[in-house]
Image: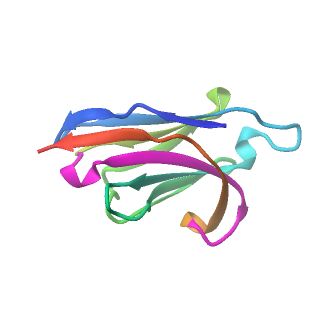
Amino acid sequence: QLQASGGGLVQAGGSLRLSCFASGFTSRFTFDDYAIGWFRQAPGKEREGVSCISLREASTYYADSVKGRITVSKDSAKNTVYLHMNSLKPDDTAVYHCAAANRYGSDWCNYEYDYWGRGTQVTVSS
């Protein structure tokens, strides 16, 4: 299971830290066997990949629209991935979801996401 949290209402230029807590691992896979992708979807728009992190290698990737403003990090001891968002813009307003993948595929960052968490709303006012 995945649970995203940390959203809220913030003024343009402000910051938020989103968390994605993962639980329910089997004996076959551990937290570090996964990649976590962050996605967002604004009303009337398609789902957009924001960032991803490979948990074992800690390699990261960012969409051009957020590069330089958002960083992703992990705390394996807490089974949690963080999305640190700075210099927020009204265009960043969306529901943010996290998803987990343990195999490659054709989705964001070339992973196949099998597990999705309920999103958290981020609203940036101008």
Quadrant where the image shows the C terminus = top left
Q: Residue furthest front?
A: 44
Q: How is the image coloured?
A: rainbow
In the rendered view, would you say 89 is above or below 15?
below
Position in image of residue 119 (x %, y %): 47, 41
In the rendered view, would you say 60 is above or below 84?
below
Q: Name which quarter of the figure residue 7 lies in.
A: top left
Q: Is residue 6 left or right of residue 2?
A: left
Compare residues 30 and 26 and report the one nearer the observer.
26
Quadrant where the image shows the N terminus = top right
Q: Which residues are magenta?
A: 88-107
Q: Is residue 97 left or right of residue 67?
A: right
Residue 43 sits inside the magenta stretch: no
In the rendered view, would you say 12 is above or below 51?
above
Position in image of residue 48 (x %, y %): 42, 62
Q: Residue at x 63, y 27 (%)?
A: 78
Q: Residue furthest bottom?
A: 106
Q: Residue furthest right?
A: 27
Q: How many numbered marks appear?
A: 0
Position in image of residue 94 (x %, y %): 33, 49
